[in-house]
Amino acid sequence: MQVKILGSAAGGGFPQWNCACANCAAVRSGQFNGKPRSQTQVTVSSDDRSWFLLGASPDLRYQIESSPELHPTSGTRHSPISGVVLASADLDHVLGLLLLRELQPFQVWAAKPVINILREQNTMFGMLNRVADQVRWNPIRAAEQFSMRSLNAADASIDCQAVALSSRYPAYVAGMPESAEATLGLILTSKSGAKLGFFPQLPKLTPELKSLFATLDCLLLDGTFWSDDELIRLQGSGKRAREMGHIPVGGEDGTLRQLAGLTKSRKMYIHINNTNPMLNEASAEYREVRDNGWELAEDGCHFNL
Ligand SMILES: [Zn+2]
């Protein structure tokens, strides 16, 4: 299975349009010891013909154009993008769907409440179903295996399983009945049996999740914030990382310490907020991440699993 990381920043990207934090300011002035990043986007393929998107970021148009694998190859209208699997209804995870509205058929896999939020509560997403057979929406359930495959079913599929993480919906959602499947993690299995974990949002780390992570060959994990009060210290107000559903990377109870026993998998932090000090490759935080065997996901990074 080919895995390509097209974007690795949290919502807002790096730099973020209205942010003048030390990281964003340094990137703009060309003085930063690290890389700018677009909003988190991963794509996978098991045959190099059919590609599946993990989420659909607001930067998707640019991310597609910078990836030759995702360009049309036959006829006037064509796309190797066969489908999208959604882990939540977060704006930075679903807005890109609206950029795919040009009547190109594809499939979406998502939990039922997420499909309802997009299709019933946000009429704009009706642009994806203006004609019959435009977008096919497939409800998925946590702990049930499903296959991502192209509509023509001629190309190779990828097995996927969702893991229920949280009943928390994005702030724009109102009046939805609570669901344990509001936020999911995704486990993808390649033909060779190798497993990729996609967890850009990790609200809590249970013993079950730790055991699950130990079975993975590669884990893409929530690297949004370094510390719980990162935004509060920067802005003087705001929410804590954990209140926003993100366990911080650093500190006594951060994921770096909590997952110190995870030694067999390739471990990469993704969905990194522009304020996170580990983005600076000259920082002590970056050194700590690397010394513990973790990598920072970067735009354009690709590997085989
Ligand atoms: Zn910033």
Image: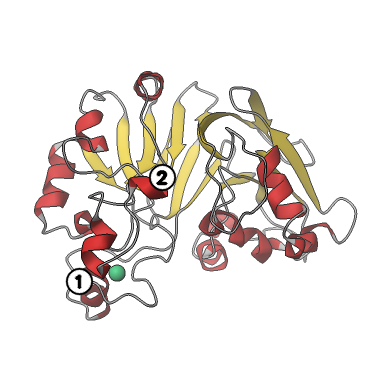
Q: State the residue at coordinates (74%, 65%).
A: 124
The verdict on label 1 being within 8 Å of ligand 1 is: yes
Q: Secondary structure at mark 2?
A: loop
Q: Nearer the viewer, residue 225 or 162?
A: 225
Instruction: Using the image, determine if residue 2 lies above or below residue 77.
Output: above
Ligand 1 is located in which of the four quadrants?
bottom left
Q: Residue at x 23, y 66 (%)?
A: 234
Residue 83 at x, y = what percent? 67, 46
Disc 2 residue type? Answer: Gly
Residue 107: % across, % down: 73, 45
Relative image position of residue 55 (x, y in whole percent): 56, 49
Residue type, label 1: Ala
Q: How would you rate the neighbour count of disc 1 (Cα within 10 Å): few for under 14, some for 14-19, many for 20 or more?
A: some
Q: Distance from label 1 to label 2 (Cα)?
A: 24 Å
* Callout 2 crowding tier (Cα within 10 Å): few <14, some 14–19, many ≥20: some
Which numbered disc, 1 or 2, marks the residue closer to the eye? 2
Q: Earlier in the sequence, mark 1 or mark 2?
A: 1
Along the viewing direction, whichever of 33 and 79 lies nearer the viewer: 33
The picture quadrant where one finds residue 253 is top left
Q: Name the residue that disc number 1 marks.
A: 22
| Colour treatment of the image | secondary structure
How far across and how far down the image is residue 23, in percent? 23, 68
Question: Is the C-beta separation of discs 1 and 2 under 8 Å?
Answer: no
Name the side, left or right, on which 247 lies relative to 253. Answer: right
Q: Which residue matches tag 2?
A: 245
Residue at the (34%, 51%) spot, across then down: 224
In the rendered image, which quarter is residue 102 located in?
bottom right
* Quadrant location of the C terminus in the rendered image: top left
Q: Secondary structure at mark 1?
A: helix
Check the image and report above or below for 274 versus 182. Answer: below
